[in-house]
Image (tube, helix red, strand yellow):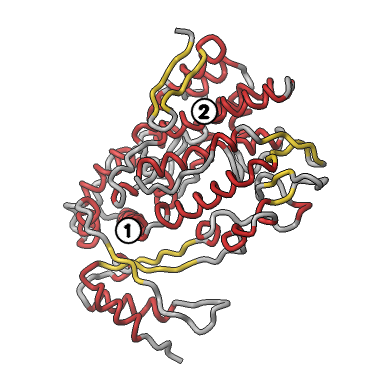
Amino acid sequence: MSTKVIRDPLYNYIGIDRKRDGWLIDLLDCRELQRLRRIHQLGVSNFTYPGADHNRLVHSLGVLHLTLQALQHLKNASDDEQVNQARAPLLATALVHDVGHGPFSHLFEPCLGIDHEEWSKKIILSEDCEVNKVLSKVAKPLPQTVAELIDSNNNDHPTWMKYLISSQLDMDRLDYLRRDSLFTGAGYGHFDWHRILSTFELHEQNSGRDIVWSDKAKFAIEEFIFARYYMYQNVYLHKTTRGFEKMIEAMWRRARKLYNDGEKVSLVPAVRRFWSGDSDVRDYLQIEEFTVLQQIQNWTENNHASLSDLAKRFLARKRFVAIDPPPVKNQLIPSYKKWEGALKRLVEKNGFTPGTDYCLRDELKAKYNQPYFPETEADEQSAKNAIRVKVDGESKPVEISTILDRLKPITKKPVGRVRYYVPKEVELAARKLAKDWKEPK
């Protein structure tokens, strides 16, 4: 067969042309890509949604599949030389854009003090990595080009290329929203993705080519925005999932402090090397989810009471409960310092010491609380910060919420949110504290 066919639960079949794009099969077989089989796409969301066991590799294949279709759409619209030259860099970027993710995906970035995009670039540029070797065989500058396309601060390539993979409406989001909805069973990821994929075009403007959509795609895009909003509210920011995320961060923080203080914390070799401060790409790639789970298993027998307890609770899914803080008087500059201190004292009074390990603050950045909020100044808009459509009678593309009133409530300027997590054993006392709370003068 001239086409490599891969079964996929979302698209049924994903095809790679062996004659034209056979190098993608070699790229897929690289050990750095295969490592993504052992990285959950949704971190610990399977603690909340048991079916959410899909991995970063299958998502990367999905992004590749959509990018292939997007390039074919552009090819059908116009035999554009720039589009033809962009084929290899875009397909490579689609497949390897997540290669730098650590255990449980985004969850471990604060634990390890990493940025997965930075590690993706390091892996792609490392001559010791198979990914680099395969890309270099296709074209010597290809690893550098792919790394630059992943780099959000790099502007050396046509903007439409970068925005096809990473923007307000890109191949990455088109895949993960539908895929995450499917595997969680949440059902919020239904939108007309095919319409979106077959109606975009390259639009010439002062800063170069950008991505816009035709007017006939506006309702499909509206569906996409609502799907993204619902998935964040009901899946990505689910309070149970966030509680386990905060628990594992607290566990890691406690272990790191003990390690820095010279105490024994039974580190597995990969974590020990990374914490030594002299780690390289090879050391980083050895930190996988089974590595972390073995580390947590080791901590269940640690002499430090809270580290051992947190490890046992995590593995046994004994969750912390979410407690919303009481309203504060100054809503413009909310301060929860006094409330947080009282909650920690309550937790410690009930036998959970130190309170910092059992009273966990979850401060959600505004951008995650409302995942689409466009740039309001028309002259500053691009696919990076707004979704724009071409409307009959308008000389320039317009941001979609300006023509669809239903979108306005979920595209206004977002606000952050603070929540706390405590052991279930003190839930009633904590809720009573929040209910009866009167801020001290």
Q: Is residue 364 left or right of residue 396?
A: left
Instruction: Give me the residue at 35% from left, 66% from top.
Output: 360
In the displayed structure image, the side of residue 386 where residue 361 appears, left or right: left
- The amino acid pointed to by label 1 is Thr
Mark 1, Cα crowd under 10 Å, few <14 / some 14-19 / many 20+, is some
Residue 150 in view in this figure: no
Residue 364 coordinates in the image, percent (x, y): 47, 62
Compute the Cα span from label 2 to label 1. Answer: 32 Å
Image x and y of residue 205, in percent: 80, 40
Q: Secondary structure at mark 1?
A: helix
Q: Residue at x 20, y 59 (%)?
A: 309
Q: Is residue 399 above or below residue 347?
A: above
Vertically, is 98 above or below 401?
Answer: above
Closer to us: 173 or 195: 195
Looking at the image, is mark 2 or mark 1 earlier in the sequence?
2
Q: Nearer the viewer, residue 100 or 12?
A: 12
Q: Is residue 246 left or right of residue 92?
A: left
Q: Residues within 10 Å of mark 2 (few under 14, many from 20)?
A: many
The picture places residue 246, in percent across and down from the top left corner, at 35, 59
Discs 2, 1 touching: Cβ within 8 Å = no
Residue at image coords 55%, 58%: 367
Looking at the picture, tell me which residue is in the foreground, 369 or 257: 369
The disc placed on residue 64 is 2
Residue bearing the label numbered 1? 240
Most distant residue in the bottom direction: 441
Above or below for 111 versus 283? below
Q: Residue 268, how many percent across, how many down?
A: 27, 41
